[in-house]
Amino acid sequence: MLSNLAARLSAFFQKTAPDPFTLAVLLTLVSAGASLVFMLTRDDPQPPIALLDAWRGDGGLWRFLAFSMQMCLILVTGHALAASRPVARLIRAVGDLPASGRSGAALVGFVAALTGLLNWGLGLIVGALLAREVGRSLQRRGIAHHYPLLAAAGYMGLLVWHAGFSGSAPLSVTTPEGARKVLPQSALESLGSDTIPLSQTLLSPMNITLAVGMLLLIPFVLALLDSPSERIGAREWIDEADAQEAAPRETIRSIPEWLEHTPLLAWVLAMGLFGAFVRYGQVAGLDRLGLNEVNTIMLALGLLCHGSLASYARAAEEAARGCAGIITQFPLYAGIMAMLDASGLIDWFAAALARGGESLAPILTYISAAVVNLFVPSGGGQWGIQGPIALQAALDAGIAPGKMVMAVAYGDQLTNMLQPFWALPLLAITRVRARDIIAYTTVVMVVAGLWYALVLAIL
């Protein structure tokens, strides 16, 4: 029943939803129109000019430049680490562990979710590679399995990532500098001199309970979805000939080539980055860990595992292809936020949300974030639009700001299971199509959605 519903939803969105960049443009036009009408009702002087000035300035279109770079690095450093030789060898070894299609789906889902909590780029690529390796291993051993289910399991990191250590919403408000990159002046003034440490978001009892619950729920649900009547082996999509052989070692003929391939420079830089991370912890405390620090440690780990600057550069270049959506869409999201702020719509939305009170406002924020993510498939971009509203509502209703931050985060990550935008690297690696996995990801999404709502309501 749920699988049929998922298939129908998938078909509906494939027929009706434009691509994410087109949606960003449409949202810009809708936001401009709504802001203009709202300003006219308040008799603001020269509303079209004021709105245009807010949209075009440094506080508008170009406000997210630093934030965009941080999000690109989250993707690139995670992808590059997953592509290193040590991680690839570990993935191949783990891929031989499952003894059945059911245990294979459960294992892939668990590993994808666990690594997704560490870094969403890492979880996405590790999940995809492990799904492929488990499929190959089961196929080689003649064990029946459903390969599209394995691929769906590899996408589970995007169902939990915002509750982990690359979550753009919680990590962007741990320091005043990070908050200024994303939030408008009105939200910063309401927040005051305080920021929101990780102890109130990622390391809160609420978020830890949610994350642990998801690590148990995801493999359990995926195992139940493995149906003996629907077995499609990996051979339908991949075979042993598709295995990527390790690149042969290059012959070093000059000093520049030696510098590019020696482990010395990569490891020296990695040690420097590790030292910078430790020093930050001593000075600011790990409770104030931000996006820069997450990228620092991921870059260090990647350099250490690749063992040469040339190898890391190749992996980073491949990963950077996935940044196109971030680069082109984030300026539009920043412009939307600027118009909503300049028109006063942020305050109006926040006041309406705050009327839900301490018990209802987080749930309403969570539900609205889940809907918005279908049209703004970027945690960072969505936080830029919805974050100011959620924080203002929290302050107005007397709710802990950290809880509202996580309400936005949970809603954002939930409907990633319906939104295939971030699944593109996984689809390329596993060679399945979005419609092959959407039924399974939707079923897991329904279970996860109930768990998220329960945790928000109780804790």
Image (cartoon, rainbow, N blue to C red):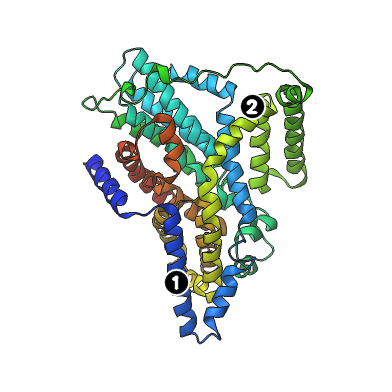
Task: Residue 395: give x, y in percent of width and height.
Answer: 56, 67
The quadrant holding residue 303 is top right
Q: Secondary structure at mark 2?
A: helix
The quadrant holding residue 295 is top right
Q: Secondary structure at mark 1?
A: helix
* Side of 227 relative to 407 (left or right): left
Instruction: Please name whichever residue, 456 or 312, is drawn nearer the observer in this view of the structure.
Output: 312
How many residues crowd mark 1 within 10 Å: few (<14), some (14–19), many (20+)?
some
Instruction: Please name whichever residue, 257 or 363, is drawn nearer the observer in this view of the structure.
Output: 257
Instruction: Please name whichever residue, 375 or 49, is drawn nearer the observer in this view of the structure.
Output: 49
Using the image, tell me which numbered label, if any, was put on residue 311.
Answer: 2
Give the Cα distance between marks 1 and 2. 52 Å
Q: Is residue 101 above or below residue 392?
A: above
Residue pointed to by mark 1: 352
Q: Is residue 321 above or below residue 133?
A: below
Please state which amino acid type lies under the numbered disc 1: Ala
Residue at horizontal 59 percent and vertical 31 percent from the top: 315
* Side of 161 relative to 437 (left or right): right
Q: Is residue 362 visible?
A: no
Task: Residue 70: give x, y in percent of width and height.
Answer: 62, 48
Task: Residue 392: give x, y in percent of width and height.
Answer: 54, 67
